[in-house]
Image (tube, grey):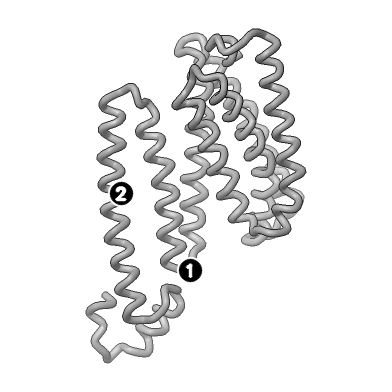
């Protein structure tokens, strides 16, 4: 429907585009088997979400380009394929997965699968066909932000915490500046990037000072150092 509304092809081209998406998803499911054997669920999820963001971002930046739509559609199908099973595998590392909990995972996934297409359908006529891509972009962005915050909550090391914060921030940069035709949107994104970069520099400077004193960036080592050096000068560490 998006391809036809944007005059990117006829009915046959749109059908091929749909087939490319599902074919890419099937390929992604097949590739996820050897990938899961080599990488942790956390790494696979980061790769999948980042790939989805880049794929959808291509369509947002070049909405009238058939090549961008084809590449973005194929990439979205390829990277979306293993997200749900990888989430289940990731959850098993932090909680006991029972039949009831698995059922709630499927309920949440099904509700999202019903709600997002319904929302796009309601807004398609009033706003235009580009609402399809924007809705998917916002969904992927929010997933990355939530996943980044989850990693931040579970991390026990400062560098990993920094990476989680920055990856969550990058997706928010995209969300703020997605409307590149708007001067206010571009200005807001530029200001956000400058302030975020400044905050990141101060964070890294603090991590460097901590590492210089403690010799480690793990929270457990920092705690042990504070306990064992209560009478020493720790102004730099503070």
Name the disc covering residue 196, or none: 2
Q: State the image coordinates of residue 140 (x, y, percent, origin top left).
A: 52, 37
Q: Which of the two residues, 131 or 56, is positioned nearer the viewer here?
A: 56
Closer to the chain start, of discs 2 and 1, is: 1
* Quadrant hosting residue 18: top right
Asked if residue 22 lies left or right of residue 222, the reply is right
Quarter of the image with the C terminus is bottom left
Q: State the image coordinates of residue 187 (x, y, percent, origin top left).
A: 25, 32
Q: Disc 1 designates what residue?
A: 156
Q: Is residue 104 visible?
A: no
| Residue at the image point whose x is 70% and y is 26% from the top | 20
Q: State the image coordinates of residue 161 (x, y, percent, origin top left).
A: 43, 61
Determine whether the residue tagged by mark 1 lies in a helix, strand or loop: loop
Q: Where is 184 relative to 216, above or below? A: above
Determine whether the residue tagged by mark 2 lies in a helix, strand or loop: helix
* Quadrant hosting residue 22: top right
Mark in front: 2 vs 1: 2
| Residue at the image point whose x is 32% and y is 81% from the top | 213
| Residue at the image point whose x is 32% and y is 56% from the top | 200
Name the disc covering residue 106, or none: none
Q: Is residue 109 visible?
A: yes
Asked if residue 138 lies left or right of residue 207, the reply is right
Report, in whole angstroms, how far the alpha carbon at label 2 lies from the one at label 1. Answer: 22 Å
Quarter of the image with the N terminus is top right
Q: Where is 14 relative to 59, above or below? A: above
Q: Where is 23 relative to 163, above or below? A: above
| Number of marks drawn | 2
Q: Which of the two residues, 153 or 55, is positioned nearer the viewer here?
A: 55
């Amino acid at each position: 429907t998006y391809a036809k509304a944007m005059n990117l092809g006829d009915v046959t081209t749109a059908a091929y585009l749909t087939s490319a998406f599902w074919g890419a998803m099937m390929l992604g499911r097949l590739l996820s088997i050897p990938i899961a054997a080599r990488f942790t669920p956390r790494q696979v999820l980061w790769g999948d979400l980042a790939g989805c963001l880049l794929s959808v971002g291509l369509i947002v930046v070049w909405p009238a380009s058939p090549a961008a739509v084809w590449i973005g559609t194929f990439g979205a199908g390829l990277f979306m394929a293993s997200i749900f099973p990888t989430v289940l595998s990731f959850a098993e590392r932090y909680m006991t997965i029972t039949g009831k909990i698995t059922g709630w995972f499927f309920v949440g996934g099904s509700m999202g699968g019903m709600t997002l297409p319904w929302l796009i359908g309601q807004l398609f006529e009033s706003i235009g066909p580009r609402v399809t891509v924007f809705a998917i972009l916002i969904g992927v962005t929010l997933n990355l932000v939530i996943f980044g915050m989850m990693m931040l909550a579970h991390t026990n090391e400062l560098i990993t915490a920094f990476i989680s914060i920055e990856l969550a921030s990058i997706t928010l940069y995209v969300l703020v500046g997605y409307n590149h035709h708007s001067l206010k949107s571009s200005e807001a994104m530029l200001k956000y990037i400058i302030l975020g970069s400044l905050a990141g520099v101060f964070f890294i400077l603090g991590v460097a000072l901590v590492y210089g004193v403690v010799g480690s960036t793990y929270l457990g080592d920092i705690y042990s150092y504070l306990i064992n050096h209560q009478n020493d000068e720790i102004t730099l560490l503070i």
